[in-house]
Image (spheres, rainbow, N blue to C red):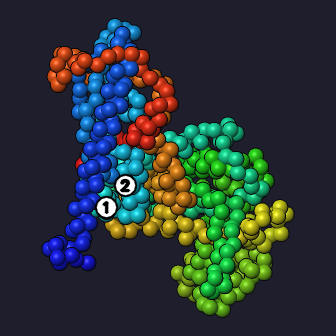
Amino acid sequence: MSLPEYGIDFNSLEKEIYKICCKTGREILKTVLESYDRALSTERDKGIYRHKGLRGTTIKTIMGEVEYERAIYEQKTDEGTKCYVYLLDEAMGIKGSGFFSGLMSEIISKASCEGTYREAARSVSELTGQTISHTAAWNVVQDLGERVDEQEQKAAALAANNQGVGELDAKVLFEEQDGIWLKTQGETRKKHGASIEMKVAIAYDGAKVTIAKKSGKKRRELTNKVACANFESTGKFQKRKEGVIAGTYNVDEIETRLVNGDGAAWIKFAAADDNAHFQLDPFHRNKAIFRAAPDENARKTMLKMLYSKEINELLIYIDALANSVEDEKQEISLRELHKYFTNNIGGLIPCKRRGLDLPQPPEGKEYTNMGGMESNIFTIIGNRMKGRRACWSVDGGNNLARLLCLKATKKLSETLQILTDMVLPGKYSEEIIVGFSSSKVANSVGKGYNGIHQAAAPATSDYKWLRNIGALQPLCEI
């Protein structure tokens, strides 16, 4: 589209108008911040805070960088030493100089979940008034990932003490777990080798069935799904998984757990409880048969015995077949299949075909067959973290994986809003020790007072506006 009469194309006009709007927004935000900083200065306690001039800082917002000044105050500690505090920063719950706004951090993290950090930086820079680098995008993800980790660690500790905060009641809980091997880099490669397994777990209470209007086919969507992923050891990961589950579900109400996995020891560990039932993942089970069977007839025979629940006969047949084939590779494959099935003999029959006495599913839901973990592995982790020559450190991979799990369970926006929402503290006087003397502070405003009256620092609901403006993240290198 173009406007030939004015000698400009529409896209250029749209960009220019957008730039003007962003500039106006930055000016408004600067005015608001500095205005409330003056209000805090007016209402502060003169006996506690001594005005020592103005210092500049920057907020990285979706409109671009907002540069503003706020007052710094001298304060004496209980030991009689001097320290310095920014009342505005304390009210907004931030420290240091230069920050990403909460909204900006959310946009960056979502873009980083969709593509590489370079792609995220490019898309954010193109669609907002703020230009960032791939390093900035990486840093934001690390910061938010660490905050999510703190949440999961606290939830795991509560779950271990039977103090989970989950309120959702479910009589039956479905759990599926699997691992995905990711390439490593740097110190992680030296310590763990060229690749390391990331453990992934999901849990849900059933499936919601909908009918497609055009095809009339049934479509099942897992309900109340939670997920977690990490490189950590079996014991730590299981505690993390239980914390994630207990953060959503009232675990005291869970009567039966159905666990689906490929038979790995760390997965079967989750099915050790008396109320848990393990089944071998159908995809891995059938894949093992297709790989080992020497021909089509043998494959059909194995599958028929499996679906007929003739498990002992199946193991005898595989052993006899291994003794009869002449090809050494085929024999090895069949013996590996026999060992795999023997080690997981209790999970060869799917839970749904065991005649378990399960309560009726809630209205509008059904207890579907388990076996979708391979798909979840791809959609949650593999699509973003595997391939494209991507390599990971343990910490870097864990932090991104936490955000990917939230995205897959549709909790990313909600969680990021909580993580980037700063609550106005009860006291403004939290100390910030700075590396410069008081003689070097008051450079911009005369003796530092600027004719401002003094009173007690407020801690009232009048400053709730700071919660939105102050939803800030640490400065990333851009």
- Residue identified by numbered label 1: 127
Q: Nearer the viewer, mark 2 or mark 1?
A: 1
Please give the name of the residue rendered at 70% of the width and 56% of the height, measured from the top-left corner: 271
The quarter of the rendered structure image containing the N terminus is bottom left
Q: Residues within 10 Å of mark 2 (few under 14, many from 20)?
A: many
Q: Is residue 60 left or right of residue 415?
A: left
Residue 125 visible in the snapshot = no
In the image, 267 versus 51, the foreground residue is 51
Asked whether, in this view, residue 443 is left or right of residue 464, the answer is left
Q: Secondary structure at mark 1?
A: helix
User: In front here: 253 or 66?
Assistant: 66
User: Which of the two residues, 385 or 13, is positioned nearer the viewer here?
Assistant: 13
Q: Is residue 406 above or below residue 296?
A: above
Q: Write down the residue under mark 2.
A: 108
Q: Is residue 393 above or below residue 94?
A: below
| Mark 2 residue element | helix
Q: Where in the figure is residue 141, as x and y percent of width and height? A: 39, 50
Residue 451, quarter of picture: top left
Q: Residue at x 38, y 68 (%)?
A: 387
